[in-house]
Each structure stands twice: as C-alpha cells, then as structure tokens.
C-alpha cells in the first residue's frame, strides 16, 4: 500500500540552530499537509501545499512541495523551545484515505 | 467553540471485553476519521466516513468497527479487544471539498490499554 516516510525520526538541536524534516511518499500526492503535535497533545494543522514546487512560509517555518509532488520538507530557522514536538506530513491516498508520515520528533535544548 | 470531543480519554480494559470510544464534532463536517498512533509508526488510519451511512476501511481496520448514523458522531467499536490494540487513538473531522479533504481537526485522544 501507499507509504509516507519521514526522516529523521528524531532530531535534537541547540536552541537557535536550524531544523529540517523530509517527507517522501511512495505515490504522487494531490496535496500535502503538515501537522504539529506537542508532547501529550493532539496533531494540529499547520499548512497545506497543493502546487508542484510550491513554497510557503510561516514566520520561521518554510514548507516546500516537490516538483514531482512526491516529497516535501519543513525547515525551521533559529529553533526556539516552543518548536518542540513531533512534525507530521500527511496526504490523501486512494479512495479518500488519508496517510500520515512516520513523524519527526524535535527536541530543542535551551 | 468548534471542537472534536472523544470519550473516554483513558481506558484500561481486559482482552475480549467489548468497548466503544465515542467521537463527536460540532462543525458540521462531512469527513470523519479514526487513527491510531504507535511509536515509530506515525498515525495510521483505521476507518473513515465521507458522510452519514458511508464508511470505508483505512489502512488498519482489522478488529475495529465504526458507524455513522448521524453527521456529528462517529463511534469506534472494539468487539473483542486484544493487547495489540493497546494504543493512542485519535478521532478527526474535516470539511470535504471536492475530491480532497481539507484541514483535519483532531480530538484530544483516547489512551487505551488492553490487558
């Protein structure tokens, strides 16, 4: 079946360093969404990308959708302790199923 | 306040004892879904529903049942729970726009332990 993988699984950074997580789908996606889950919380929507090659920014967060619409990335500039959590990419699959990536857990060391 | 509610939040049960986890949303969303979250595996979709009386299997439907008799409610039923169903469960809802789902709104989660 369809698979959505993310790397790395874990990332520890010093506060102020940059962070990037990569998302790869086994099939082409019509759109890709990113979610953030704080420790002990539930996933919260961050953004949706639809167009091939699309780049969107939210303050220190930059999201990219690959040209082939099979991969995506999230880059955080100058991490802060408030960025701690697990970041998931997600996208629709066959017959309106929805697939989430395996997630990247970010720890920010003050 | 727009929200997705789940009950119970925590549940410890024994193998074979039927249980139901309720999910309700007040946003009039068409699309509702159940996920389970396990370490290293992300969120995996169990079942989803595109509208009342329309349900479909997700990636990991074995051992689960759902129903969608009303638009706002989407209960998850475990007829005979087993220890491998110990997990964190999330219900989510979303407006259904065209052929693509929109933002998914998640409930707070239900942590289930099956002994």
Image (cartoon, coloured by chain):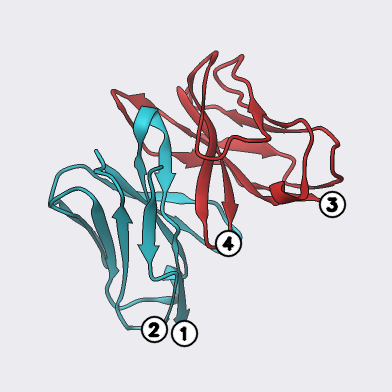
Chain colours: A cyan, B red
Q: Residue at x 35, y 32 (%)?
A: A94
Q: Are marks 3 and 4 on the same chain?
A: yes
Q: Are marks 2 and 1 on the same chain?
A: yes
Callout 2–callout 1 Cβ contact below 8 Å: yes
Callout 1: helix, strand or loop? strand
> Which residue is at the front of the view, A92 or B30?
A92
Give the chain letter at badge 4: B
Foreground mark, 2 or 3?
A: 3
Q: Residue at x 35, y 37 (%)?
A: A93
Q: Which residue in the protein does label 4 denote? A: B39
Residue B110, percent from left and from top: 68, 46
Residue A46 appears in view: yes
* Separation (CA) of disc 2 from disc 3: 41 Å
B70 in relation to A70, above or below: above
Callout 2: helix, strand or loop? loop
* Separation (CA) of disc 3 from disc 4: 19 Å
Give the chain letter at badge 1: A
Residue B1 appears in view: no
Callout 3: helix, strand or loop? loop
Foreground mark, 1 or 3?
A: 3
Q: Which residue in the protein does label 2 denote? A: A15
Callout 4–callout 2 Cβ contact below 8 Å: no
Give the chain letter at badge 3: B
Q: Which residue in the protein does label 1 denote? A: A109
A50 to the left or right of A108: left
B7 in relation to A65, above or below: above
Callout 1–callout 3 Cβ contact below 8 Å: no
Label drawn at residue A82: none
């Amino acid at each position: 079946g369809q698979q959505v993988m993310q790397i790395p699984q874990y990332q520890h950074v010093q506060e102020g360093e940059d962070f990037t997580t990569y998302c790869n789908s086994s099939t082409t996606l019509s759109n890709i969404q990113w979610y953030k889950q704080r420790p002990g919380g539930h996933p919260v929507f961050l953004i949706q990308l639809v167009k091939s090659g699309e780049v969107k920014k939210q303050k220190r967060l930059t999201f990219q959708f690959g040209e082939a619409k099979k991969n995506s990335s999230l880059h955080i500039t100058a991490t802060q302790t408030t960025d701690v959590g697990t970041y998931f990419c997600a996208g629709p699959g066959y017959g309106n199923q929805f697939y989430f990536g395996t997630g990247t857990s970010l720890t920010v060391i003050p | 306040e727009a929200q997705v509610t789940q009950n119970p939040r925590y549940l410890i049960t024994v193998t074979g004892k039927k249980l139901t986890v309720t999910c309700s949303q007040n946003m009039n969303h068409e699309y509702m879904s159940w996920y389970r979250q396990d370490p290293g595996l992300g969120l995996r979709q169990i079942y989803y529903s595109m509208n009342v009386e329309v349900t479909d299997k997700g990636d990991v439907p074995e051992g689960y049942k759902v129903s969608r008799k009303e638009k706002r409610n989407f209960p998850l039923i475990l007829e005979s729970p087993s220890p491998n169903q110990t997990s964190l469960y999330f219900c989510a809802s979303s407006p259904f726009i065209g052929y693509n789902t929109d933002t998914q709104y998640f409930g707070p989660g239900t942590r289930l332990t099956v002994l």
